[in-house]
Amino acid sequence: MLARRIIPCLDVKDGKVVKGVQFIGHEVLGDAVDMALRYRDEGADELVLYDITASAEGRTVDYNWVRDIARALDIPFCVAGGIRSAEQAVKCLNNGADKVSINSPALERPDLINELAEMAGSQCVVVGVDSRELDGDYYVHQYSGDPDKIRAAGRRTLDWVVEAQTRGAGEIVLNCMNQDGVRKGYDLKQLRLVRDLIDIPLVASGGAGAVEHFTDVFDQCDVSGALAASVFHKKIIHIPDLKRDLQAAGIAVRI
Amino acid sequence: MTGNSANKIVVVELGCANTASVLFALERLGADAVLSSDAAEIAAAPKLVLPGVGAAGFAMSQARALGLVEVLRGFERPLLGVCLGQQLLFETSDEGDVECLGLIPGKVTKMVVPDGYVVPHMGWNTLEPLKSDPLNDGVTEGDYAYFVHSFVCPVNDYTLTQSTYGAPFAAMVRKGNVWGCQFHPERSSATGSKILENFLKL
């Protein structure tokens, strides 16, 4: 049976994992390769490595640490942050990344999704969507890596996820910004709405704070995976315990 | 770790992305692995791995352009196709309606799934061994492997291991000196390493 995926997200700056997405005063948690292997050993199903400053600084990911991680790791990983062209994405893949996630650049130029899917195949193309609830609807935001640059992208989330799928995305990571960082649970309502609109895998992001949040999102939203950062980094949730609890709740997980 | 040692493995580079991870996995196991698109080097290899991500039509046109179709068809030592590489071993693929290598009987078809299933089939799924073989030695029912695909190889006489997503499909195949894995052994943690190690021992 296909297992639901538990996906730690590591925010990377200069080959180091840093805490949070804040630009100022971030704390170095450790070397990216070391932390990737630690999460692999704990039973993570996949990792997202997010170059937190690349997109806002107008540069692309540094491929050297991508290669270092690919050399060491034997579970899949996705690289996000600043991939602006199909060539850059292919370079990431050629350096050993399994998938690339595009967010702000896809909003600036949606054809990027098509180009990437044609060159590398949809299975490598993840579209990350930062979505915020406003007046009863959901809207896409861009440049969320930088508090000074973040802005609404002028698109409804429910339109954008369908367009991304039509253009060739192989997976959507929906980051629900109202929930992000507060650890009060995933945005079940929004995730369910998106799940019902698309037929590619959906990964939930934003809000995980306790084991029952994972149980709820798999049970109620039928997502393929659940992404989280701080609960894992701060050791509030230990992945082996989380997976045991999910299994006990009847959710298929890889143990 | 260079030269033409008997344990040298050539990883066929068809210009599709993601050959590095296969190479790195073989290196982690201590193999002398090189990437190559050169027909003569590929024909002379003690062992071949045919990886692949992307579309069957593109991969076959690359193989033709590089003069590799007949080299691969005539290869007599162990050959392992991975993911799309397994699909290329079959006769035809519905993905682009393309003729493949024809080393294993059967047709690659688009995955048909029940309502509510998402495609691609992406993630960790359980293996169901059907036949014992040196390649799946040590792989037991319920071991997980990492899959990413939308097209499937049929379960037939050449299936070693199947997996199920809506319907069963071939997860590992063998005919003579030709083996295949639909999943990514290089991304399937301990189970994947065991399978690659088995291939190195052949």
Image: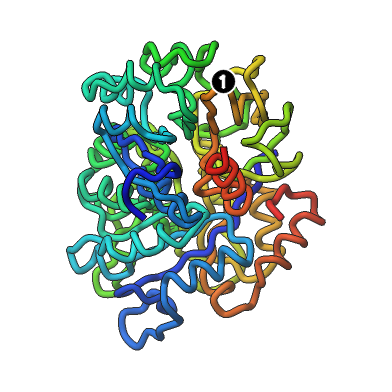
Chain letter of disc 1 in the image = B
A128 to B168, vertically: above or below: below
Locate residue A202, reporting x and y percent: 52, 45
Q: Position of residue B107 (x, y in %)?
A: 51, 12
User: Quarter holding the N terminus of chain A?
Assistant: top right
Q: Is residue A174 visible?
A: no
Count of number-bearing discs: 1
A142 and A229: which is toward the camera: A229
Residue located beneath label 1 in the image = B176
Specify whether residue A46 is in view.
yes
Provide the secondary structure element on which disc 1 rests: loop
Question: In the visual, does B168 lie left or right of A126?
Answer: right
At x 28%, y 64%, the residue is: A64
The part of the image, by quadrant, that contains residue A236 is: bottom right
The percent position of residue B42, horizontal first and vertical second, equals 32, 31
Q: Residue at x 66, y 72 (%)?
A: A238
Vertical relation: A169 (above or below) B151: below
- The residue most toward the bottom is A25
Q: Residue at x 75, y 41 (%)?
A: B140
**What is the crowding at mark 1: few (fewer than 14 residues within 10 Å), some, or many (at least 20)?**
few
Left/right of residue A219 with respect to residue A68 in the rendered view: right
The amino acid on which the numbered mark 1 sits, given as a three-letter code, is: Gly
**Residue A246 picture quarter:** bottom right
Horizontal side of B165 relative to B67 (left or right) equals right
